[in-house]
Image: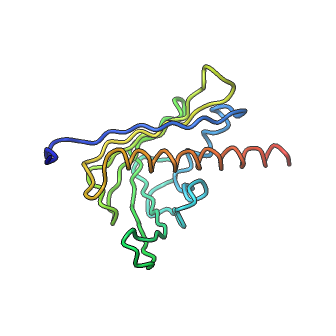
Amino acid sequence: MAIEPHMKWEGKVCAKLTGHSADQVWPLLEDFFSLHKWIPTLDTCRQVEGVLGQPGCIRYCAGNVLPSDGSGETMINWATEKLLAIDPVKRCFSYEIVENNIGFNSYVATMKVLKDEEEEGCKIEWLFVVDPVEGWKLEDLVSFYNSSLQVMAKRMEEALQATEQT
């Protein structure tokens, strides 16, 4: 089955953080240049241009991965990402991938920190819209983002607990 050229993939993943409010988690997420602190597959996330927290700023993210071809050689996946909008009151921001070697075209994502109405704590939502990625299925991309977000939430919880103990 061929993918229609105008079709977009859309995905949404969520992670709950217990015992920490949205107001506590937001400062960790809103730092656009600190993604490598939360996602272990990223070796770097650094400022390329612009002012932190201001729409238009650009970050470079990169990490080493082992290719699935079994060669055992490590390659570097990288992307430059531009902050499109940020709203500290609603605790959300949107960004787009400007350049990359991963195969993403026309990628835009929004990350939000929301109060969890059911339990004490909050949740992070990561929503994305992207052109279909060659060699991937939408379900695989959603699964990848979900596992990344779960690790990210766990690391944020650990960082917040560590600051509470000092």
Horizontal and vertical percent for residue 48? 45, 64
Q: In this view, does 146 lie to the left or right of 166?
A: left
How many numbered marks are there?
0
Would you identify the image quadrant in which residue 88 lies?
top right
Horizontal and vertical percent for residue 63? 49, 67
Horizontal and vertical percent for residue 20? 70, 34
Horizontal and vertical percent for residue 112? 50, 36
Residue at figure coordinates x 43%, y 54% from the top left: 57
Q: In this view, does 32 lie to the left or right of 139?
A: right
Would you identify the image quadrant in which residue 127 lies?
top left
Residue at figure coordinates x 45%, y 48% from the top left: 145
Seen from the viewer's position, the closer of residues 60 and 158 is: 158
81, above or below 143, in the image: below
Residue at figure coordinates x 54%, y 55% from the top left: 35
135, above or below 108, in the image: below
Q: How is the image coloured?
A: rainbow
Seen from the viewer's position, the closer of residues 25 and 82 is: 25
Residue at figure coordinates x 26%, y 50% from the top left: 106
Would you identify the image quadrant in which residue 37 lies?
bottom right
Residue extending farthest top: 118
